[in-house]
Image: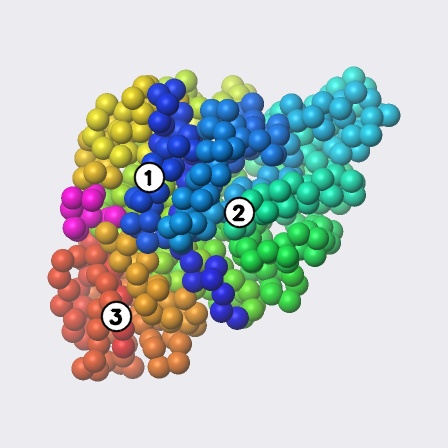
């Protein structure tokens, strides 16, 4: 079934790092308003906004203390209303982050819940007795340490930081309060939700979990994520709220296969439109993200192709390389030094020609890279500091290895300020930002990109325009070619008489490729190529990180 959110391209904004207008070093809503014309010029259809709700910021806004108020650092509800109106005037839709697996421990519900077992809000959260002097089970937080914290004579569950207590979705009153909150935003005109760790809301068992690698605690994800009852809750949410609005929904769902994802997104199940999966983002790390793993291109092909072909025909994919939880893709899977433009545009081509809704993370469209930190104190992310305590201070990982891998995989790489120009603070702010600016802002910035008609920015814009022009890119079938080739990622898309061939060179050496016999004709057309020229013949030579899309 055709629909607007399948044909859309989404631009993700991390407000804290996008644009500061009041000089406090923190991005704000007025900064986004100021840059709406820039966003429009890229050609995207939807903006996904990371949390802007009231929060003490233990996890940068994912610990919410008031779902229906704006974080003071970001502005006011009037600012939000103006932002939403400005987007809609430009034909851009807005989806919000919905964080309902947990709240902040400073949320009024939890403050009341802590008061004792007789509190009407006690059961809004998950409280358990300990086992003697120990926690209720061996579960570890996703951010390291125990997943339990004690208040008086009981423990509460927090799958993330101790300031993010998990909500109890078994409680019907709590669920109805969540649905009321969702209606508040949808009635304002918001166009959908990205649902944070939504597949974790159902806790089916509280047994101990397997301990992975050299970890100290059990793997909470293996026992909490994707429990069957999550589908009851999501269908109820659909019936109570979602189906009454023309909106887009995407769920963050770690540890899913296409078969599991299908249960969330198949149209006849009436739950979500699409999910984020993480298989391709786990490819280069081992039992934890601070332990690197060697990988080969056929592995990436297998993962991405599986998600293209194995979802039910009535299900839908989300396509992404970057977001606020991932390091910069050009530094991770490309070459951010000798071939930054080439590898950034190659990776973009590979993804945007696939079946699904593409997501672009702020700065990706100008090829922003990882930053380099040589001191632990330079990192702001709670995940880094908790991981250091659990892994380095206990002797499981050497300090140098942890720092080296942090410079590859830390979430802070995606959170450095947006690089608007080459000024002291990259045009992000007039004051020192909350996190350091990448020194390469002198050469990598929006101002420079807009002046260069061969820039990564304009390449992204061309990719977006191609999706709007060629229906095969949105709805066509996917066929992988050369599945064992260790340097080339090649695939076809087909829809009726419209067919394209996508060829991407993942290597910094030239690779030769023989075009398949069935596409050889006099009517071949190059739709896009990330070099200035491309000689179209039966045997093509692909330069370092070259990408080409051929219509046949």
Choose the circle earlier in sequence order: 3 or 1.
1
Highlighted magenta segment, given as a residue range: 449-457
Q: Secondary structure at mark 2?
A: loop
Categorize mark 1 by other alpha carbons within 10 Å: few (<14), some (14-19), many (20+): few
- Residue at numbered disc 3: 550
Q: Secondary structure at mark 3?
A: strand
At a point 78% along the width and 30% down the height, the residue shown is 121
450 drawn magenta: yes
Depth check, mark 3 against mark 2: the one in front is 2
Residue visible at 24% across and 54% down in the picture: 459
Residue pointed to by mark 2: 190
Q: Residues within 10 Å of mark 2 (few under 14, many from 20)?
A: many
Quadrant in which residue 475 is drawn: bottom left
- Mark 1 lies on residue: 35
The label shown at residue 94 is none
Q: Please identify the quadrant where the C terminus is shown.
A: bottom left
- Is residue 257 something that shows in the picture? no
Label 3 and label 2: CA atoms lie apart by 38 Å
Mark 1 to mark 2 CA distance (whole Å): 19 Å
Residue at the image position 21 percent from the left and 69 percent from the top: 526
């Amino acid at each position: 079934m055709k629909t607007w959110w399948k044909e859309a391209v989404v631009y993700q904004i991390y407000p804290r790092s996008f644009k500061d207008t009041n000089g406090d070093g923190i991005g704000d809503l007025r900064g986004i308003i100021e840059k709406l014309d820039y966003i429009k010029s890229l050609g995207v259809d939807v903006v996904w906004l990371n949390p802007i709700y009231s929060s003490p910021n233990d996890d940068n806004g994912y610990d919410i203390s008031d779902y229906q108020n704006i974080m003071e650092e970001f502005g006011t509800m009037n600012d939000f209303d103006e932002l939403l109106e400005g987007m809609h005037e430009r034909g851009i839709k807005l989806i919000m982050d919905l964080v309902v697996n947990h709240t902040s421990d400073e949320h009024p519900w939890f403050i009341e819940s802590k008061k004792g077992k007789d509190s009407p809000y006690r059961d809004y959260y998950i409280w358990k007795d300990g086992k003697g002097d120990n926690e209720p089970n061996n579960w570890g937080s996703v951010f390291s340490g125990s997943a339990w914290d004690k208040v008086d004579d009981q423990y509460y569950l927090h799958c993330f930081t101790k300031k993010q207590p998990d909500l109890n979705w078994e409680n019907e009153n709590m669920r109805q309060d969540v649905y009321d909150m969702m209606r508040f935003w949808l009635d304002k005109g918001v166009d959908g939700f990205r649902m944070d760790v939504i597949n974790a809301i159902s806790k089916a068992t509280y047994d101990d979990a397997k301990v992975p690698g050299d970890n100290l605690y059990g793997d909470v994800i293996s026992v909490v994520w994707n429990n069957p009852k999550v589908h009851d809750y999501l269908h109820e949410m659909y019936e109570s709220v979602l189906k009454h609005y023309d909106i887009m929904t995407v769920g963050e769902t770690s540890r899913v296969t296409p078969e599991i994802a299908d249960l969330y997104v198949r149209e006849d199940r009436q739950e979500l439109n699409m999910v984020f999966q993480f298989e391709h983002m786990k490819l280069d790390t081992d039992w934890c993200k601070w332990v690197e793993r060697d990988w080969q291109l056929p592995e990436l092909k297998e993962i991405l192709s599986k998600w293209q072909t194995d979802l039910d025909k009535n299900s839908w994919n989300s396509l992404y390389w970057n977001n606020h939880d991932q390091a910069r893709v050009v530094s991770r899977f490309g070459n951010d030094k000798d071939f930054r433009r080439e590898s950034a545009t190659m990776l973009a081509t590979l993804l945007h020609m696939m079946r699904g809704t593409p997501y672009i993370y702020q700065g990706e469209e100008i090829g922003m890279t990882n930053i380099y930190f040589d001191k632990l104190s330079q990192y702001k992310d709670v995940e880094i500091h908790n991981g250091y305590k659990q892994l380095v201070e206990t002797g499981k990982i050497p300090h140098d290895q942890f720092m080296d891998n942090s410079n590859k995989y830390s979430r802070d790489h995606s959170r450095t300020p947006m690089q608007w120009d080459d000024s002291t603070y990259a045009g992000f702010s007039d004051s020192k930002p909350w996190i350091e600016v990448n020194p390469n802002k002198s050469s990598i910035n929006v101002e420079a990109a807009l002046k260069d008609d061969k820039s990564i920015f304009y390449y992204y814009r061309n990719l977006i325009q191609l999706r709007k022009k060629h229906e095969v890119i949105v709805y066509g079938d996917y066929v992988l070619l050369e599945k064992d080739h260790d340097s080339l990622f090649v695939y076809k898309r087909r829809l009726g008489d419209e067919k394209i061939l996508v060829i991407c060179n993942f290597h910094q050496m030239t690779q030769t490729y023989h075009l398949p016999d069935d596409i050889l004709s006099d009517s071949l057309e190059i739709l896009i190529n990330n070099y200035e020229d491309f000689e179209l013949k039966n045997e093509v030579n692909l330069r370092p990180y070259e990408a080409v899309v051929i219509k046949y």
